[in-house]
Image: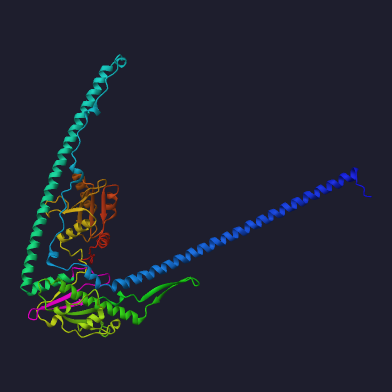
Amino acid sequence: MTRRSSGLIGLWVATQQQRQREQEAQYRHQIAQQREREQLHRQAQRAAARDERAALAAYQQARLAEAQARTAELERQVTIACDVLRSVTCTPAFTADRLRDRAPIPPFSPGRAAVPVPMPDPRRYQVSAPTAWQSLAPGARRQYDEQVAHARARFEQDCRAARAAEQQRQRWLAEHHQRYQAWVARRHREQAERDAAVEDLVRRLVQRQDQAVQEYFTAALYATPWPDGFTRRARVAWDAAARQLVVDWQLPPLDVVPAVARARYFKVRDETTEMARPVAERRALYRDVLAQCALRVLAELYRADVHHVLDSVALNGMVDIVDPATGIPALRYLVTVMAHRAEFEVISLDQVEAVTCLEHLRGQLSARPDQLLAVRPARLPEQVGGQIVDQHTDEAPDLFQMDPIEFEQLIAALFQARGFAVLTTERSGDGGVDVIAEDPDPITGGEIIVQVKRYRNTVSPNAVRDLYGVVTHRGATKGILITTSGFGPGAHEFAQHKPLTLISGPELVDLLTRHGLSGYLGPAST
């Protein structure tokens, strides 16, 4: 028979059992917390691993995208080079009308000067009469009369200032409009002179005069743009007896077909490798490009010959090299063809294969143009006799050597390319103004005074002060001083916090390049 303990022993046992249960519960709680901490730690590790993998994946994806973009750019270059012939069929044929100056003459735009100066509003100068209670104060009437007299004086002063400003605006507007009308008249005269020159050129072209034939077809060769890397240079001679145009045309170098075919990213090595284009593939592509260039030149000439002056064209394609035997610059001919009109006009250029078409015309194409293996030209311009027209418009003019008027016209063309209405001033009596540009923006727009200094030495601060005086006197929005040299600290310090912009020679060259114009700074010493 079992007997339960009682008394002191029973109480002590119960207490020990309770403590044991509490310790076990605490132990279980600690174990649970430890497990929870371990679980959170494992979750954090997994999250960090996921973030690391995500970051690695994002990095690898970016490197892969860079390689793909590089490959796409290489393919784009090849596509442009191999489409040089078909692009000409999408452009209109050259005619003598392209030589006329058809640029629209912008309307007279005085900007904010067209708005009359507002006269003061008399209501803003009224003085309230004192109330009955205010009139009881000593001196109230005298004070009121003084306020009325002061308000009347301010109103009359403001009216005089507004009338003076309006008169100044009208004078400025009349002067500006007079200069605009003179500029328009000069533009009309220049257009009339150009039209007369074009008509004379066409008349002499129909008569097949040597100089006219050479000038017209040279212009036709420079009328359409070519892709980057394709230098346009033509040497033209005219054989009147044979009615044959003999042309030397500069071909693009091998670089127009990239030596790299594609870029590939390797994840294991974390490395991007450029894969070389096979030599045979590059040679075949380059031969195709050269054949397309020759056919395009022939097409441009015959499409421009609306008066049927030409019976045939002898074309030679050349590249500039440095002769490895002598170290002297020389020409290496890679293409030659003599194409007759009747034979060429039946060809559908948008359907042909360039190399096959050139062979059909009995032309010669270098078998190894990548190694500059030359062909023998059928006929050179020097063999015709007479004058040879040699143009190379891709050479930028030396800004130091330009005619002053041409330099100002170049600056005017720069502002026109930036969207401004522009007129140049007369050489005498321009009041320190070379170009006037009108910004059409309704908020920030206005007249901009432009001065150009074709200097070789640093522009003095006095020139900047003079420009600021002109801007202030004319009420222009801004003044710009452009030079082929530079500015010293004094000039920049004076221009600070004023509506003035200083453009140095290197900055000017950069602006011209970015807006499709050309010019460079030759040697600074005379």
Colour scheme in use: rainbow
Which residue reaches farthest right? Answer: 1
Q: Is residue 20 left or right of residue 179?
A: right
Residue 240 inside the magenta-drawn segment: yes
Please tell me whether residue 8 is drawn above or below residue 347 in the rendered image. Answer: above
Q: Is residue 422 left or right of residue 255?
A: left
User: Closest to the observer: 410 or 355?
Assistant: 355
Q: Is residue 453 visible?
A: no
Q: How many marks?
A: 0
Please tell me whether residue 223 is drawn above or below residue 414 in the rendered image. Answer: below
Task: Locate the C terminus by quadrant.
Answer: bottom left
Q: Percent position (x, y) of residue 269?
A: 49, 72
Region of the chain picked out in magenta, as a range: 222-249
Q: Is residue 113 left or right of residue 34?
A: left
Q: Percent position (x, y) of residue 307?
A: 9, 72
User: Closest to the observer: 395 or 17?
Assistant: 17
Q: Percent position (x, y) of residue 282?
A: 33, 79
User: Closest to the observer: 149 or 243?
Assistant: 243
User: Closest to the observer: 58 or 312?
Assistant: 312
Q: Percent position (x, y) of residue 108?
A: 15, 49
Residue 70 inside the magenta-drawn segment: no
Q: Quadrant of residue 172?
A: top left
Please tell me whether residue 473 is drawn above or below residue 64 in the rendered image. Answer: above
* Residue for point 70% across, 54% down: 32
Q: Is residue 117 visible?
A: yes
Please tell me whether residue 196 is drawn above or below residue 26 in the rendered image. Answer: below
Q: Is residue 136 left or right of residue 52?
A: left
Which residue reaches farthest top? Answer: 136
